Image (tube, rainbow, N blue to C red):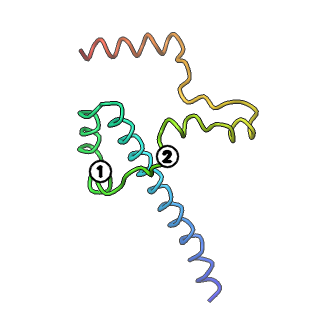
Amino acid sequence: MSSLAAIKTPSHSRNIEDQSNTERQRDVLVLILSHLRSQGFIETATALVNESRSVDTLARYEVADNVDLMQILKNDEYYKIKFGRRPVFCPQPQQSEWTSWRRRINNVE
């Protein structure tokens, strides 16, 4: 019986972790969707809903009244206390990366 429990325990914890990651991904999409709508990017928000694998899920959830994407990005004090510096959400690209990106954009248009 203990060998069966030893097999079930890692599997159960992996299932809980997978479920937690799925919920986080959903929460991120809902936060982005809310932010896009609040900034007036209605067509982009509609495209996000249409392209999402979880269209039904996105329609069922709304962001809580006391949370928004900007608030989360501003709340970096924990990171600063733990690591001694503020998080970098969007690092400045190197010149070669920037040039390569611009070439890709210009070729597409």
Q: Give the crowd class for mark 1: few <14, some 14-19, many >=20 residues within 10 Å.
A: few
Secondary structure at badge 1 equals loop
Q: Residue drawn 41% across and 52% down? A: 26
Mark 2 and mark 1: span between their CA atoms? 24 Å
- Left or right: 29, with 108 as reference point: right
Q: Residue at x 54, y 61 (%)?
A: 17
Image spot of residue 58 (x, y percent): 32, 52
Q: Which of marks 2 and 1 is nearer the N terminus?
A: 1
Depth check: give the residue in front, 4 or 79: 79
Q: Mark 2 points at which residue?
A: 67
Q: Where is residue 16 in the image (x, y as percent from the top left)?
A: 52, 66
- 2 or 1: mark nearer the eye: 2
Mark 1 residue type: Arg
How many callouts does the rendering have? 2
Give amino acid for label 2: Val
Residue annotated with mark 1:
53
What is the secondary structure assignment of the residue under circle 2?
loop
Quadrant of the rendering where the N terminus is positioned: bottom right
Q: Quadrant of residue 45?
A: top left
How far from the left and from the top, in percent, is residue 36?
Answer: 35, 35
Residue at (24% x, 40% y) in the render: 46
| Residues under numbered marks 2 and 1 in contact, where contact means CB atoms less than 8 Å apart | no
The answer to whether 57 is drawn above or below residue 77 in the figure is below
Relative to 46, residue 98 above or below: above
Provide residue 40's location: percent of width, then percent of height. 30, 30
* Residue sitting at x 29%, y 40%: 48
Screen quadrant of the C terminus: top left
Crowd band around label 2 with a 10 angstrom C-alpha radius: few (<14), some (14–19), many (20+): few
